[in-house]
Image (tube, rainbow, N blue to C red):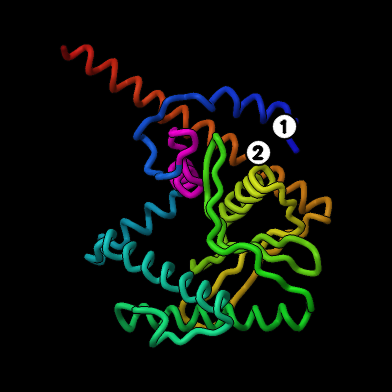
Amino acid sequence: MILEDNQVKELLEKIKDLEIRNSTKSNYSIDDKRVPRVTEILSAMMHEDNLMNWANGLGWKRISYRAFMKDSQDKGTYSHLAIEIFLRQGRIDLDTDLQIPNQKIRDTVESCLDGFIQWWDELHKLHKNIKLIYLEETMINEYFGGTCDCLLQVDGEYWLLDFKTSNHMNYKYSLQLAAYRYLLKNTKNINISKCMILRLDKLNHFYETQEFDLNNKDHLNYIENCEQTFMILLTAFKMRMYTNLQYQEITNLNKK
């Protein structure tokens, strides 16, 4: 790790009581104080140049960015729901278990679900003792909150999973997993042995994984560095919200 544990704790304590009021879009709260969510922090603090170029490209093609994003979000939401139903029931019938609004979304759900079931079957061929612990579990502490997709117990070890329907892997997903790992440890006293990103292809009915075995020294070091990176982003996020509120208050006073 780049920072010592006590340095991270000092950093978090300094920002814990910063007042950000309604600056966060999150509905998570603890002791009547709203806290930001993991995905909100990462989205706000990790803009990518290629994302702007992609959005501009949509504009040139006369494609609505908002409509495109809504469509993508719906595909991801329904795919997640299908997987959740499958894991809870051990089966799923897309005709009766989900009210999918259109065929385009259904095609995506079928592809992602097929990819997940392929992975799930392979997992059971390799491991005999698999237990579902959490699905869509929300965790909140005094600094931030988040909802992890899935926690499994595999042969006595805890595996943290995040499902993605994006077109490619992104290192930002590691930061998200590291934040959830921190919450599981600090709110539920669960020690994670493996972090996994399971990317489900939206078109071609297959999956790919990125796995970080925390019994491996290098993998553990990477996830710990991701955790520290997330904490620094959290600090910057709260400072950004706080100074924005200060600015609004000062400029409003000057107008009076």
Which secondary structure lies at badge 2?
A: helix
**If the image is split into quadrants, where does the C terminus sit?**
top left
Left or right of 4: which side holds 171?
A: left
The residue that appears at 60% across and 25% down in the rendered structure is: 13
The residue that appears at 73% across and 81% down in the rendered structure is: 124
Crowding near pointer 1: few (<14 within 10 Å), some, many (20+)? few
CA distance for labels 1 and 2: 7 Å
Residue 166 within the segment the image draws in magenta: no
Locate residue 20, reporting x and y percent.
40, 29
Vertical order, 244 against 1 (above or below): above
Left or right of 79: which side holds 67?
A: left
- The label shown at residue 228 is 2
Left or right of 35: which side holds 177?
A: right
The residue that appears at 57% across and 64% down in the rendered structure is: 135
Judging by the rendered image, the residue that carries numbered circle 1 is 3
**Amino acid type indicated by mark 1:** Leu
Q: Nearer the viewer, residue 190 or 159?
A: 190
Crowding near pointer 2: few (<14 within 10 Å), some, many (20+)? many
Magenta span covers which residues?
Answer: 29-46
Q: Nearer the viewer, residue 167 or 254?
A: 254
Left or right of 241: which side holds 159?
A: right
Comes first in the chain, label 1 or label 2: 1
Q: Nearer the viewer, residue 173 or 80?
A: 80
Residue 42 within the segment the image draws in magenta: yes
* Tags 1 and 2 touching, CB below 8 Å: yes
Vertical order, 226 against 13 (above or below): below
Locate residue 218, reporting x and y percent.
80, 51
Locate residue 14, reporting x and y percent.
57, 22
